[in-house]
């Protein structure tokens, strides 16, 4: 899954690089490690201001849409929101998706059916997921 920065196009200015994030409001994904590939957002030395924290990427999209700041969100969410634009100067990240099953249940027909369905949906939507 590809993750990029998104912001409203009407923002006064978008940073031109990771080093130019100082003075910008950022929206931070609050989990154990943060949004994969963008953990550096939480570093105070970057000079950005954390305007919003959430543990749900959809909440970050909503906050970015409201103009609260820059958000690193999965492309499949950000691209669906027409009022957001990609901030390509800050790069992107990828994170793996895992389908986890219990070893003893993996061969069960109902578990196999669900696993096959999930794999099919992911393959069918690969372009959207990979951004």
Image (cartoon, rainbow, N blue to C red):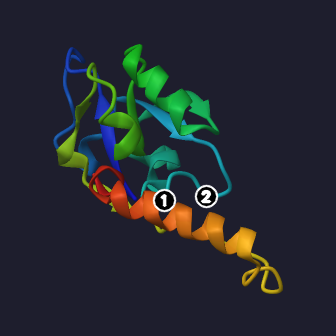
Distance in Å between CA atoms under marks 2 and 1: 7 Å
19 shown above or below 48: below
Q: Residue at x 68, y 56 (%)?
A: 32
Which label belongs to residue 36?
1
Element under disc 1 = loop
| Residue 97 visible in the shown view | no
Question: Which image quarter holds the N terminus?
Answer: bottom left
| Residue 123 visible in the shown view | yes
User: In the rendered image, which residue does mark 2 sit on?
Assistant: 33
Which quarter of the picture shows residue 109?
bottom right
Q: Residue at x 16, y 41 (%)?
A: 16
Element under disc 2 = loop
Is residue 38 shown left or right of residue 125?
right
The answer to whether the residues at label 2 and label 1 have Cβ atoms under 8 Å apart is yes
Front-most of 45 and 18?
Answer: 18
Front-most of 130 and 105?
Answer: 105
35 shown above or below 56: below
């Amino acid at each position: 899954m590809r993750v990029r920065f998104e912001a409203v196009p009407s923002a006064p200015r978008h940073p031109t690089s990771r080093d130019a994030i100082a003075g910008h409001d950022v929206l931070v994904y609050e989990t154990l490690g943060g949004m994969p590939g963008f953990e550096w957002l939480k570093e105070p030395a970057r000079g950005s201001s954390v305007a919003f924290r959430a543990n749900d990427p959809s909440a970050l999209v909503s906050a970015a849409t409201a103009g609260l700041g820059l958000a690193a969100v999965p492309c499949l969410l950000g691209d669906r929101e027409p009022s957001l634009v990609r901030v390509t100067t800050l790069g992107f990240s990828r994170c793996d998706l895992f389908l986890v099953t219990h070893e003893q249940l993996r061969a069960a027909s109902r578990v196999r059916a669900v696993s096959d369905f999930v794999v099919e949906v992911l393959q069918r939507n690969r372009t959207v997921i990979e951004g």
